Amino acid sequence: MQSRLVEKVRSTLESVGVKTPRKLRQPKSDTSNKDRRHKILALVLAGGEGGRLDVLTEQRAKPAIPFGGTLRLIDFSMSNCRHSHLPDVWIVEQYEVFKLNEHLANGRPWDMDRTYGGLRVLPPFEVHDKNKNDDDKNDQSGSKDKNKEKDKKKNNNEKSQDNDDGHGGFATGNADAIYRQRRLLNDFSPDLLLVLSADHVYKLDFRDVIDFHKDHQADVTIVTTKVPEGDSASRFGVVQVNEEGRVTNFEYKPKHPKSDLVTTEIIVYDYPKLMDTLEQLADKGELKDYGEELLPNLVKEGNVWEFRLNSYWRDVGIPESYWKASMDLILKKSELHLDDPEWPILTRSTQRLPAHLLDSARFENSLISPGCVIGGTIIRSILGPGCIVDAGAIIRDSILFDEVHVEEGALIERAIIDENVFIGKGATIGVGEKKDLTMIGRRVQISPGSDIPAGEKIHPEKEED
């Protein structure tokens, strides 16, 4: 009765040329898939050991590696989630979690430290195991069947690894990492799961991808891009698509790629479909990366679509790619613009005074972080906070992390130097005919006059127990 009265009032007002206030308008009934409100969860996979980055990840998680002087790699996925206004962001962790969590600061840098929603961290875990407790009791009571019980426990554990219900443990790949957290994911029960990697450099509004996914009523939407300059398609998942944008073929790290179109590991899944597929694959064998079994199976079913990313993107999971992305900050700032006030890359950083440039300092197209004291020559290089470069030292085409001290007369070329490294007077690093990157791990002390040839990798000093 009331709705008919409102409609009559609206019609009368409009008939005499009076605009109807919004509060008197009746919303149209719309049950389309696009306009239905979806429950969305962003899941950032930050648990990989990152062994391909060699000395840089021996004592830190790959997502916590510095980038551009003051940022960390995970800042890109976190900032994109923040600017995309995603209310729930979860991070799957596994390797070197303490330093990563210290940087995450409960989500504060991205305004995600909220009472409800916001950032949640999912570390490796285990749950109550009745078989283990029974064995412990048998051990204490001196059971004669101890060996028999241990064999039974072993068989039960092997079975539980294949068909367990949220028993946690350490993942063997990104598909396995999602599946091991299924108990918590099922409790949250999202409609859509946005899965992200934590070691890529890019900017993207995820709402565009989500809208595309809903428009196409897709099971999976894969964000794709052309192979970055100087990189190889064999490092990625390679896709082929038809004229509509439907993915028709998927190959994971093929030796002979059939296309230059690759996945960015930014993927929107229909959550029920994802979990059903993971359950089926888990029953058949061990889950690893989603490029090995998960995506190929979903592509075969025919409802996987691509969302093309035509702006800057680079996977920095290997040293050469990391170095190129860092140099792009200097040489291709128009493509990799991190100073955009409309889409800043947010981070947790220590408060430092501005860099101090001495009279003897000379610069050429470089990035110098706060807290640095520079007396030497810096050419096409990036220096993290608190670095000291004495007069007479030369740094060229290199990346220095926090608190590196380079004494007078030292020469560094095409190198990545980790934090708290000391380089003595007159030392040379990376000099020679070879073009391979030179890498020096944390807290290493390079003696005066030393010669570290190009391509050398020096492991970090072991941390004290």
Image (cartoon, helix red, strand yellow):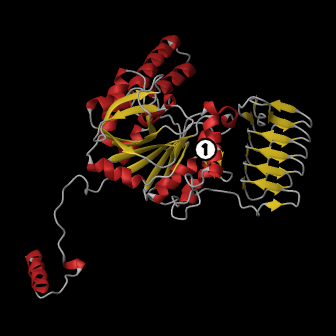
How many marks are shown on the rendered structure? 1
Q: Which quarter of the rendered picture does the C terminus lie within?
A: top right
The location of residue 363, given as percent across then percent down, is 78, 55
Q: Residue at x 48, y 11 (%)?
A: 148
Other-residue count near label 1 (Cα within 10 Å), few / some / many at <14 / 14–19 / ≥20:
many
Answer left or right for 33 relative to 414.
left
Instruction: Name which quarter of the figure residue 94 lies in.
Output: top right
The location of residue 67, given as percent across then percent down, is 64, 48
Residue 61 shows in the view: no
Instruction: Name which quarter of the figure residue 100 lies in.
Output: top right
The location of residue 110, given as percent across then percent down, is 54, 58
The location of residue 114, given as percent across then percent down, is 49, 60
* Of residues 6 and 223, the one drawn nearer to the viewer in this rendering: 223
Give the residue number, with chain letter if any, for mark 1: 325
* Of residues 286 and 259, the one drawn nearer to the viewer in this rendering: 259
Mark 1 secondary-structure assignment: helix
Q: Residue at x 31, y 47 (%)?
A: 213
Q: Which quarter of the rendered picture does the N terminus lie within?
A: bottom left
Instruction: Name which quarter of the figure residue 285 lies in.
Output: top left
* Of residues 383 and 20, the one drawn nearer to the viewer in this rendering: 383
What's the amino acid at mark 1? Ala
